[in-house]
Image (cartoon, rainbow, N blue to C red):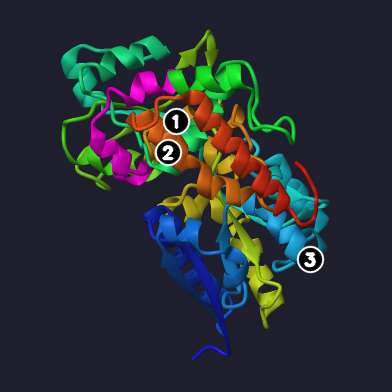
């Protein structure tokens, strides 16, 4: 029995749990008196239960970067820049996959290490496209044409639709959340919603119950769908033997003459301020996010690392049929969501109204945008620290 037991909380996919279990095993070999136990919850539970509550129970927490405003306001996790060597953090910054590392820096402090990096990217069944003599879509018009054949899968639950709404606002020429008055102007927002509807009105209704994992499972388990224009990428499905059929990942298409900018995700590793074993938890975080472990043990055990050298590593790309090298340009072009304390209220509530529009239950785009602005105002009122970012 170990003298010290650290508890961690993560999410219930191989990408989320398996590399952490491998890291814990190795850490215990290096520190025989310390055991790290990982617990998991669903992506929906991840969204529904406040992380700040979990810090009272867990030493180590896998978080999403939009939560760091709350971390800064509540102080429930450690500011890692006060505990880790400056050279280590500088190396992390220099090896950020897109904006992954700085997305956890807020209000002057680093609240998490970028342990995992992701953004919506395109995926496809190479075998099926080749058999049909169809090339991978390069433009939005080509996506729509393939969707009309019933061959396109795309996640359409509220959170993913909201992330894609940001993408299409940018594609229409304006970045959302530029002011505290509105999420986006009516002209841009309406154009974005209508562009999205062009696709979502064509796809199977089952997509409105699917997150990126379920889309990847559907595409790899049967031959119904050939292509997905944007879903948070999972390198697991590009590895031999993980699923029935292999998925290939690639850059997103162009819209209005420019590559779409997708909304980055990924996860960070935080240390609870309530932990009774802070130094041991920090030591684990330092190890699992280190260049050596990220490039080797983390990636080789189903992980999708947050360290750039792991993404450019030749062996890792051979292992994943070039998932990392193909998706890296999308990561580098990614959009970072707001992170102010209160933003998560907006994220939790707004997507359902975008979904109603895509489903066809609400045909008035201006009514959707008005509702988004109301929720945005509420979220700013919840911003107790009054910090806008």
Residue behind mark 2: 233
Q: Which of 177 and 57 is in front in this view?
A: 177
| First-in-chain label (3 vs 1) | 3
Residue behind mark 3: 83
Q: Can I make out residue 36 in this image?
A: yes
Task: Name which quarter of the figure residue 289 lies in.
Answer: bottom right
Q: How far apart are marks 3 and 2 (CA)?
A: 32 Å
Q: Give the range drawn in magenta.
A: 195-216
Q: Nearer the viewer, residue 170 or 29?
A: 170
- Left/right of residue 206 with respect to residue 61 in the rendered view: left
Which numbered dot is residue 121? 1
Q: How far apart are marks 1 and 2 (CA)?
A: 6 Å
- How many labels were placed on the picture? 3
Residue 50: percent from left, percent from top: 57, 64
Task: Name which quarter of the figure residue 11 lies in.
Answer: bottom left
Considering only vertical position in the picture, is 183 above or below 235?
Answer: above
The answer to whether the residue labelled 3 contacts the one labelled 2, judged by CB atoms less than 8 Å apart, is no
Q: Which element type, helix, strand or loop, lies under badge 2?
A: loop
Q: Is residue 281 magenta?
A: no
């Amino acid at each position: 029995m170990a003298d010290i037991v650290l508890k961690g909380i993560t999410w219930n996919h191989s990408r989320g749990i398996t590399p952490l279990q491998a890291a814990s095993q190795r850490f215990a070999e290096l520190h025989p008196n310390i055991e790290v136990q990982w617990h998991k919850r669903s992506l929906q539970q991840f969204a529904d239960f406040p992380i700040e509550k979990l810090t009272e129970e867990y030493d180590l927490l896998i978080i999403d970067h939009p939560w760091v405003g709350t971390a800064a306001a509540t102080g429930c996790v450690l500011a890692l820049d006060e505990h880790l060597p400056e050279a280590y953090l500088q190396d992390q910054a220099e090896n950020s996959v897109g904006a992954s590392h700085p997305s956890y820096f807020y209000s002057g402090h680093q609240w998490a290490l970028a342990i995992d990096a992701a953004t919506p990217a395109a995926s496809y069944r190479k075998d099926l496209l080749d058999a049909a003599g169809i090339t991978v879509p390069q433009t939005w018009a080509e996506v729509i044409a393939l969707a009309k054949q019933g061959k396109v899968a795309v996640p359409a639950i509220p959170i993913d639709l909201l992330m894609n709404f940001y993408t299409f606002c940018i594609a229409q020429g304006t970045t959302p959340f530029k002011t505290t008055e509105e999420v986006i102007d009516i002209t841009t927002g309406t154009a974005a919603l209508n562009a999205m509807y062009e696709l979502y009105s064509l796809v199977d209704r089952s997509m409105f119950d699917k997150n990126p994992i379920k889309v990847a499972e559907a595409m790899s388990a049967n031959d119904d769908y050939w292509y997905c224009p944007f879903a948070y990428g999972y390198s697991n499905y590009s590895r031999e033997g993980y699923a029935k059929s292999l998925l290939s990942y690639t850059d997103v298409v162009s819209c209005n003459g420019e590559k779409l900018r997708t909304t980055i995700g990924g996860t960070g590793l935080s240390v609870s301020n309530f932990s009774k074993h802070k130094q041991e938890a920090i030591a684990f975080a330092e190890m699992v996010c280190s260049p050596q472990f990220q490039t080797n043990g983390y990636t080789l055990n189903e992980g999708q690392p947050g360290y750039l050298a792991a993404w450019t590593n030749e062996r890792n790309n051979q292992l994943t049929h070039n998932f990392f090298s193909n998706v890296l340009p999308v990561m580098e072009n990614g959009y970072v969501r707001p992170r102010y304390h209160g933003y998560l209220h907006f994220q939790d509530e707004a997507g359902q109204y975008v979904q109603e529009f895509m489903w066809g239950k609400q045909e008035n785009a201006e009514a959707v945008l008005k509702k988004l602005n109301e929720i945005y105002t509420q979220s700013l009122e919840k911003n107790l620290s009054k910090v806008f970012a």
